[in-house]
């Protein structure tokens, strides 16, 4: 038998070797063909994205979940999905938005919002380097910014942005995470009011918001807003190095159209990049130039000590008016409805990607400061000087492709720009503006990402393209097909496609970071001693059931593999039952779940040392089972219990037990 | 073409020789296990597998330490171990008449390895319906305090 096995393996090896050698030679012949570009026949590509079982990926990628409202975490280069972090949408798998602890996270001035459209992840930075502390992401529909804590990979905070409509140009950090920003894509009446839509040009305004981030806790507050003309503010990036202290926002619809923007917003040859001097803003605030304006918005914070979120009503915001604050805002004319705006690692070059153009317009920060000093103005709009185009221009990447959208950098003096219309990425030289290489994407790329590619020191090994259309790239799944990303190796002169991988929702943007900046900080359990949840039961001795009128609080614990209590009686139809469930485990990766038959709610998935609360209003008399939803041990199937529901007018005694 | 065959030959040869090496190692391990089973096993001589190698216990019970141990025990262990009666796992009452102090501490500190490799822990796992001892992230100092608490039961 032994020898037969050996012969078998020898045969297998022969076949593998033959195939390998064969493929290598095919690869050589096909080098210049489209097939090679797709990577399909290149022999060594698979090994370059292969992460052996049990091995870690080299990078984390935080990829926007788009209209799913969530943030997906992938490993690179494998493209393996590691986790979906619920941010702006409810998630019954994790009880996000269903548990009593997390419901407040989705409160807004419009009430509970179970969904939003997540757009741009942005990692926190220290000295212009990604530091692995937090990831921010904007909600586009009901304007908000969220902060995800990268020790727990949980949403820790969400702040609503008042005076805003469609938070698209967000959250894009400054180089020490002094601020993340929010700019309104849709201008709205200011203050919000009942007016005719055709009063747009007079009554509507565009607001840019600066959210201060506490350097210790990460807590956000809207430090100030800047009131601007009613344009559409599209994307942003903050300066770095020499341009630290400034943030740049692209705008379109400087025509101020309020209908058929497809035509009306594309009339002007040039729109503007708004350059905001936020250090100057701080001076004006210190001088008391900020107007306290009534504003209705929510600030929701998850407290890790109590395992509970609270939603705080906010009532005012400070607004700066450009006409009262000279030097606060300048407009840089930029051709053809600029979309993305990106600042190179040195902070000198500001790339405006004119989405209806074939060219990239690159402004110089040094030229901008000189133009400001020399008052080289074309005109002044609502108190804001418009700098002369030719005085701020550094250069143009000419006829690079069609429809440039976004640019990232590799830290070796090269820019990489996505072109939506011509569906490609173009690599170009910063400073000489010459095109070095181009590669097709499949299909219709939006954003692209290089780990640290918008920071001072990119980790320029890989690049990820995020595509709008997938069509024939994967097995069909009916009319709705997966969204998709593509991984490229950018270490050589030529960009090289390595891998396609599916994403959740529409991947608008992503951030990447080498794993070593996060792994050591990742939390494994919540310590029971530090659990300050008001309804925690830290041991089975502390479990109980307490009636308070129609509210019944069940203090329950779970450990492999039983609930305490697991028999509960005396619940009545119409009661509101709060199950406060504490996982007593203190070992890594031993969550337990909980759900009750027929309750109109989600499961809870409780991590070791954590307490979560889920509610149930029983509507029918009977005895109902509950059970652990997450396989936990060989006795997982035994991890169950019963809860008895009596008629509303019954006199069934309230009692609870385990093992009696 | 000759080069191709040469590569195949080399790869195959390497694989075969690697295979033989592994088989040899397996056989050795098997012999060891048989030798182990042949001797009479005494739990009171078994110190278990883990960080605690040798522990000397004073005659007097340190009541202050025991109180601290009871506190940790109630928080982290009592859900499965009732102090004086069999529950999900065995009761700690009288455990030092059945086990060495080192074994008790290693069971608390290193349960994953213990239930896989230690003969007494393996036997307990089977006796207790395959409910594995959980690692509750106890420190060595805390485990020592709990051991003192067990002496008071």
Image (cartoon, helix red, strand yellow):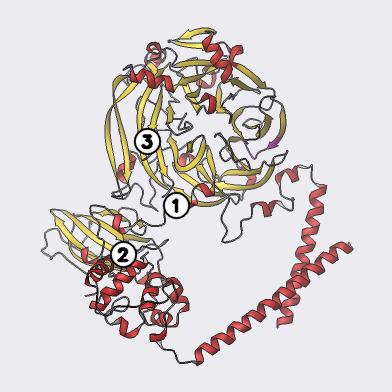
Which circle's residue, 3 or 2, is located before the other in the chain? 3
| Marked residue chain, label 3 | A
* Labels 2 and 1 share a subunit: yes
Crowding around mark 2 (Cα neighbors within 10 Å: few <14, some 14 to 19, many 20+) is many
Q: Quadrant of the rendered structure where residue A197 is?
A: top left
The quadrant in which the C terminus of chain A is found is bottom left
Which circle's residue, 1 or 3, is located before the other in the chain? 3
- Give the magenta-colored segment's residue range: A438-443
Per the rendering, the mark at residue A558 is 2
Residue labelled with disc 1: A522
Question: At which x and y percent is residue A382?
Answer: 43, 10
Crowding around mark 3 (Cα neighbors within 10 Å: few <14, some 14 to 19, many 20+) is few
Q: Is residue A612 above or below residue A413?
A: below
Q: Is residue A408 above or below residue A308?
A: above
- Total of numbered circles in the picture? 3
Residue labelled with disc 3: A214
Q: Does the rendering let one see residue B80?
A: no
Q: Nearer the viewer, residue B110 or A504?
A: B110
Question: At which x and y percent is residue B148?
Answer: 28, 74
| Residues at discs 3 and 2 in contact (Cβ within 8 Å) | no
Disc 2 element: strand
- In this view, the residue farthest toward the right is B2
Per the rendering, the mark at residue A258 is none
Q: Residue at x 48, y 10 (%)?
A: A385
Q: Residue at x 31, y 82 (%)?
A: B96
Question: At which x and y percent is residue A117?
Answer: 44, 37
Gap in Å between the C-alphas at discs 2 and 1? 24 Å
Which circle's residue, 2 or 1, is located before the other in the chain? 1
Mark nearest the camera among 3 and 2 is 3
């Amino acid at each position: 038998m032994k020898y037969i096995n050996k012969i078998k393996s020898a045969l297998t090896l022969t076949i593998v070797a033959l195939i390998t050698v064969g493929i290598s030679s095919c690869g050589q012949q096909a080098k210049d063909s489209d097939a090679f570009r797709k990577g399909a026949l290149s022999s060594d590509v698979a090994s370059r994205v292969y992460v052996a079982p049990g091995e870690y990926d080299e990078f984390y990628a935080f990829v926007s979940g788009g209209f799913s409202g969530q943030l997906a975490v992938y490993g690179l280069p494998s493209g393996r999905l590691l986790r979906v972090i619920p941010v702006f949408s409810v998630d019954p798998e994790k009880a996000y938005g269903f548990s009593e602890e997390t419901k407040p996270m989705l409160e807004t001035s419009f009430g509970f919002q179970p969904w939003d459209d997540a757009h741009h992840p942005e990692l926190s930075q220290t000295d212009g380097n990604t530091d692995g502390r937090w990831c921010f992401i904007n909600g586009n529909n009901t304007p908000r910014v969220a902060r995800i804590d990268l020790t727990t990979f949980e949403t820790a905070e969400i702040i609503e942005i008042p005076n805003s409509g469609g938070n698209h140009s967000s959250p894009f950090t400054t180089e020490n995470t002094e601020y993340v920003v929010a700019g309104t894509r849709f201008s709205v009446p200011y203050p919000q009011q009942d007016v005719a839509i055709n009063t747009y040009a007079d009554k509507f305004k565009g607001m840019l918001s600066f959210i201060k981030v506490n350097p210790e806790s990460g807590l956000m507050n809207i430090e100030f807003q800047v009131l601007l003309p009613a344009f559409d503010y599209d994307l942003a990036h903050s300066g770095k190095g020499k341009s630290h202290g400034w943030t740049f926002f692209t705008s379109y619809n400087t025509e101020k159209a309020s209908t058929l923007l497809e035509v009306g917003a594309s009339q002007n040859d040039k729109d503007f990049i708004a350059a905001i001097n936020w250090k100057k803003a701080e001076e004006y605030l210190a001088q008391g130039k900020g107007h306290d304006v009534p504003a209705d918005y929510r600030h929701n914070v998850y407290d890790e000590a109590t395992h509970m979120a609270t939603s705080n009503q906010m009532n005012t915001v400070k607004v700066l008016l450009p006409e009262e604050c000279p030097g606060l805002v300048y407009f840089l004319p930029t051709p053809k409805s600029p979309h993305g705006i990106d600042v190179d690692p040195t902070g000198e070059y500001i790339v405006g990607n004119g989405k209806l153009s074939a060219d990239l317009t690159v402004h110089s920060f040094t030229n901008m400061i000189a133009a400001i000093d020399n008052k080289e103005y074309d005109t002044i709009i609502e108190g804001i000087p418009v700098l002369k185009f030719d005085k701020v221009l550094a250069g143009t990447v000419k006829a690079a492709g069609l429809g440039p959208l976004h640019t990232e950098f590799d830290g070796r003096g090269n820019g990489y720009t996505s072109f939506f219309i011509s569906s490609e990425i173009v690599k170009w030289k910063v400073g000489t503006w010459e095109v070095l290489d181009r590669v097709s994407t499949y299909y219709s790329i939006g954003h692209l990402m290089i780990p640290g590619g918008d920071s001072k020191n990119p980790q320029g090994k890989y690049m990820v393209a995020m595509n709008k259309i997938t069509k024939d790239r994967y097995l069909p799944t009916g009319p709705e097909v997966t969204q998709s990303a593509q991984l490229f190796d950018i270490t050589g002169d030529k960009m090289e496609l390595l891998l396609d991988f599916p994403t959740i929702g529409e991947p608008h943007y992503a951030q990447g970071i080498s794993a070593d900046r996060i792994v050591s900080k990742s939390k494994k359990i919540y310590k029971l001693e530090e659990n300050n949840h008001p309804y925690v039961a830290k041991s089975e001795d502390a479990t109980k059931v307490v009636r308070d009128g129609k509210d019944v609080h069940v203090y329950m614990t779970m450990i492999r593999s039983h609930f305490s209590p697991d028999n509960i009686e005396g619940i009545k139809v119409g009661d509101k039952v709060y199950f406060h469930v504490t996982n007593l485990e203190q070992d890594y990766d031993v969550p337990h779940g909980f759900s009750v038959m027929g309750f109109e709610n989600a499961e809870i998935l409780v991590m070791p040392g954590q307490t979560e609360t889920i509610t149930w209003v029983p509507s029918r008399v009977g005895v109902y089972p509950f059970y652990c939803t997450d396989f936990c041990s060989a006795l997982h199937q035994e991890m169950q219990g019963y809860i008895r529901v009596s008629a509303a007018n019954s006199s069934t005694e309230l009692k609870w037990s385990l093992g009696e | 073409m000759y080069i191709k065959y040469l590569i195949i030959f080399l790869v195959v040869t390497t694989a075969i020789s690697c295979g033989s090496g592994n088989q040899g190692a397996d056989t050795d391990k098997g012999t060891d296990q048989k030798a182990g089973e042949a001797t009479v096993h005494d739990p009171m001589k078994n110190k278990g597998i883990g960080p605690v190698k040798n522990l000397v216990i004073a005659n007097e019970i340190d009541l202050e330490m025991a109180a601290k141990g009871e506190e940790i025990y109630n928080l982290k262990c009592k859900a499965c171990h009732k102090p004086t009666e069999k529950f999900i796992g065995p009761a700690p009452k009288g455990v030092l008449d059945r086990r060495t102090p080192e074994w008790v501490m290693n069971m608390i500190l290193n349960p994953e390895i213990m239930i896989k490799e230690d003969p007494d822990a393996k036997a307990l796992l089977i006796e207790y319906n395959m409910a594995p001892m959980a690692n509750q992230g106890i420190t060595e100092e805390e485990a020592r305090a709990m051991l003192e608490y067990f002496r008071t039961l």
